[in-house]
Structure formats: structure tokens, C-alpha cells
Amino acid sequence: MSQVYGPLVTVTLAVIFDVCCVLATVYLCTVVIDRVVEALKSKSTACAFLASPHVKKSIKFMLWMVGLAISMQNIVVLLATNLILQQQMLYTYIVAKNVTFVLYIVFVVLVAFSIMQTIKALENQWINDIKKGKLAKIDTITIDIVAKILKICVVTVFAMFLLERFGIGTSGVIAFGGMGGAAVAFASQNLLANFFGTLLIYLDRPFLIGEEIVIKEMGIEGRVEDIGWRITKILDKDHIPIFIPNANFSKVWIVNKSRSSNRHMLDKVGLQLSEKASIEHIGVLIGKLEVSLAKHHGIDLEQPITILLTDFVPKAVELTVDLYIKTTEYKVFQKIRQDIMLLVFNIAVDEGYNVIFSNDNKKMIQVHQGH
């Protein structure tokens, strides 16, 4: 009995000792990394980045996976050099080898998953830094495409590892892919067109996530929510999601409102004339409006402020207000526009005019012609 179980006890103790040493080493490494990063994060941008919770968590997970890999490798070596020499323990070795094979597969999957999580954590951290203005030279779309390419590389490399482990030669897989490439390409023309459309979006950057665009050919206007490998998601003014295949963007004109320095305001105001406010006093009213609007904080004073008499009938006139507002955001633009229109209305009323219509509403003029 001692001849049978002696090697098993020896190997078991060696395995336990080896695993404990490896895990203790990994634990010490994580502690040292924590201490060093915390000590230097105020002095180094890189250390401050590594000190973020999700990045540290991913790095620690990878360290533990590496430690597990080393332990499994040592277990295989110990079993191969000790138990296989004992014929009566051959069954134990076969079982241990199969278990180790399964553990290896699990390890590869976990390491691939941990690397993917690390890439995702780095992506989120960089995007947050960009939003806070810490990375002014990099935009979110660059981070997005780099992260996606890295994820594809990780999946490809670890898939090759698994195929080799199962005894499938990667050269044969590549050769099969070459023979079937033409058939796959023919069957997935739209998919490939959308993929290359995505690459063109990343290279040309006609729009970024969060920007407001207009596609006149499609009658679409809204904010870009996401740029995927196949489709782009746009949220319109009614918060309805619109999904557009990326291949279509190479065939249409794209107006990017977010990259303009301001928004154009062009509105018409109808005024009813009276004895106090006759057409001869329109010049005085226009002068007061120009002076007041020139003091408004929301108007781009580097652009012309134009107020003109553009139409009139016996008892009413039409003024056109043409100027530029210092914003690209739709909601902010509408609030400033409302403020400007109220200012125009109040000044006109103070001068004795009645506001009777706006935006070229001719019916209101016709109604007031009879009074």
C-alpha cells in the first residue's frame, strides 16, 4: 500500500505547496501594485489612470489568471514526472490529465474574458477622461475603434490557442477560410459594405457620437447615439431611435450642425399700425431693436444683426429678424430664440405696435385689413 500511495501523497503535497507559493506570489504582487499606484497617482497621470477601480480590478483578475496558469502547468509536470512512472497509478494520471485539459480550456476562456474586460475598462476610463477634458488630443471615436480592433485581435488569438489545443491545425483553418472566402464574400455583400462604411466613418469622421446631424436625402435629423460595426443609431427630436446601415453614409450629404460655431435665426414678425405707430416710425423701431439686440448675451456679435421691413399692407407691416445665436445645441438655441422674440415683441408694444402674426402668416394680415 505504501508503494501505491507513497508517490500520490508526495505529489499531492508538492502540488499544494506549489499552488500556495504561486497564489502567495500573486497576492504580494497585487499588494505591491496597490501601494505603488496609490503612492504615485498624484504625481503621474498613468498611475492615476491605473488607480481607477475598474482598471485595477481587471489587472488583478489577469494576475490571478496568470498565477492559476502557472499552477496548472506545474501540476501537469509533477504528474508526468512522478505518477506516470508508477503503472498502478496510470489511471490517476489519465484522470488528472483530462481534468488539467479542461482547466486549461477554462483558463484560456477566463484570460480572454479578463483581457476583454480590461480593454472595456480602459475604454470607459479614457472616454470619461475625454469628457472631463484630460485627453484633449484624442476623441471618443478613436478610442472606440481601437477598442473594437483590440477585442477582435484577442478573440482571434485565443481562438487559435483553443484550436491548437484540440488538435486542429490553424494552417488548415486558414486554408479553408481562403477557399471559402469568395463564397462568404458573395453571400455577405451588404455586411461587407456596411463594414467598410464603418471604416470610412472612422477615417473621415463626418460625425462623432453625441453630435447632431441632418441627412436631407433621408429626411433625418437627430443626435448620433452609437456607431456600430454595421449600423449607426440616431435619436431624432422625438427621441425615436433610427438605425441606418453604415454603407448608406457614403451615398448621402451629411450636415453636421454640432460643428458649426452658431445657429442661424430667421424669423418674421407682423405688426399692426396705428396713429401712434405709423409706417413712418418703422425706422425708429428698427433702430431700437438693433441697439437692444446688440446687447444680448446669446447673439453672436461677430455676425451681422439684420432687421428689415420685408412686406407691408395698408394697416400692417412685416419685419424680418436675421441673426446668429452663439450655440449649436437645439434646446439652448430655442430658449435664446424665445428670449429674443419676447424682447422684440415687448419693444414693439412699447412703441405702440400690436404683434399680429409671425413667420409669414398672411391670414392674420388679411384679418386686420378689415379693421
Image: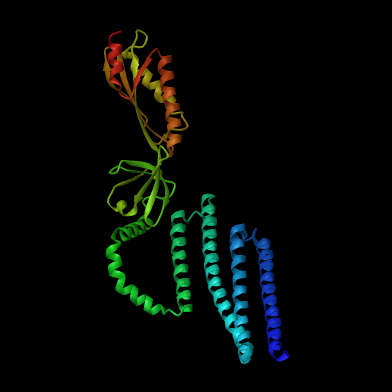
19 or 166: nearer the viewer: 166
Q: From this viewpoint, is residue 115 visible? A: yes
317 or 127: nearer the viewer: 127
Residue that appears at 55% across and 74% down: 102
Residue that appears at 68% across and 62% down: 39
- Residue 30 in picture, x, y percent from top left: 66, 67
Quadrant assignment for the N terminus: bottom right
- Compared with 360, 354 (above or below) is above
* Residue 10 occupies quadrant: bottom right
* Residue 365 occupies quadrant: top left
Residue extending furthest front?
1
Q: How many marks?
A: 0
- Residue 122 in picture, x, y percent from top left: 54, 60
109 to the left or right of 311 = right
Residue that appears at 51% across and 53% down: 130
136 or 91: nearer the viewer: 91
